[in-house]
Image (cartoon, rainbow, N blue to C red):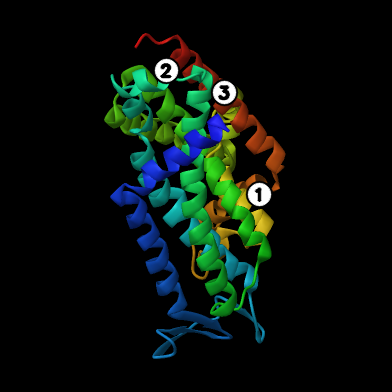
Amino acid sequence: MQIWALIVDSFRESRDRKIFWVMLGISVLVAAAMACFSFEPGKIDVFFGTWAIETDLFTEGNELRADRIRTVAVEWILDLVVGSVGIILALIATAGFFPAMMDRGAIEVLLSKPLGRWRLFIGKYLGSMVFIAFQTAVFVALTFVVIGWRWHAWAPAYLLTIPLMVILFSYLYCISALVAIFTRSAVAAVLLTLGAWVVFTGIQTTEDTFYLYPQWQKYGTAHTIARTARWVVPKTQDITYVAKKWTRAAAGTEFVPTDGASAEDQRLIEGATKAERNRMRIPALYTIGSSLLFEALIVLLAMWKFTRQDY
């Protein structure tokens, strides 16, 4: 009950911030903008049929390619709005939770209660998870209805992206919590977490590049180092691949035009397709489990520092 009270208190704290309502507003605006479009065989209706864009990109024969429509939803919208912009806004909104709790006066009141420090940490940490879970659930629910109603591509598995986005946030928030506890600075927590995100992405991109340029694989040591580093760090990019796999979306490279492409361009497209399909074949348990192992180590370090800190 004590931990639950802390979770509720953290959620209320985030709700009192303007950024909470900004994120809700973004979700509503994106869903409304999506509803202005409708996929039809051979065309895309814009603004409720005001005009149409003739294209066969989402049509095969006389039927819609639901898998490609799901790709638009997962890779171009969900990944951008929640997986990028939403995560950054959530990090900004939650970065001050621990520094505010550790301020003199606030922490003394909390420590005067019969509540262990580890419970304080867990309650505040999980409160941030509830914040992003709520925001993600609103966005996914709204867009799920639009994708089925307006885009004619009902995908119940799309709802599974809610926990996936929360997991993605947790990969990064553990860094934010650790930095916040060591520095007691929300600004440092945001900046260093974004820096860590860039590093994680860079490591994953480097390993994927070996698939894009097979001739590089002759550098066995470098390839092994890149593959090992990718296994160690949180695999933030894999969340999108898992979401596409679960929703049965098409590969993003299918949208790359190949007509008139040079032999070199076609080879690069084939390499990118191979890399994407390889990532989509990786078991979710492997990519998420190994990433959560990294997160658990960071969380334990942050908890240890919080419980040993002098206030």
**Residue located beneath label 1 in the image:** 280
Which residue is at a point 55% across and 24% down the rendered structure image? 222
Q: What secondary structure is found at the residue carrying circle 1?
A: helix
Q: Is residue 286 left or right of residue 192?
A: right
Amino acid at the residue labelled 1: Met
Please state the horizontal and vertical placement of residue 165, each as a whole percent of the image: 54, 48
Q: Amino acid at mark 3?
A: Ile
Q: Which quadrant is home to the N terminus? A: top right
Does residue 298 appear in the picture of this structure?
A: yes
Closer to the chain start, of discs 2 and 3, is 2
Mark 2–mark 1 distance (CA, rounded to whole Å): 47 Å
Q: Nearer the viewer, mark 2 or mark 1?
A: 2
Disc 2 secondary structure class:
helix
205 lies above or below 157: above
Residue farthest toward the front in the current orientation of the protein = 113
- Circle 1/circle 3 CB separation < 8 Å: no
Badge 2 or badge 1: first in the primary sequence: 2
Q: Please give the residue where the numbered disc 2 appears in the rendered image.
A: 111
Gap between marks 2 and 3 measured at Cα: 45 Å
Question: Camera-side residue: 264 or 135?
Answer: 135
Q: Which one is in front, 85 or 186?
A: 186
Q: Residue furthest bottom?
A: 50
**Which residue in the structure is indicated by mark 3?**
225
Q: Of the residues shown, which amino acid type is indicated by label 2?
A: Leu
Q: In screen coordinates, is 216 left or right of 18? A: right
Question: Residue 243: which numbered mark, if any?
Answer: none
Residue 54 placement (x, y as % from top left): 47, 86
Q: Position of residue 271 (x, y in %)?
A: 58, 49
The answer to whether residue 158 is above or below residue 6 is: below
**Foreground tag (2 vs 3):** 2
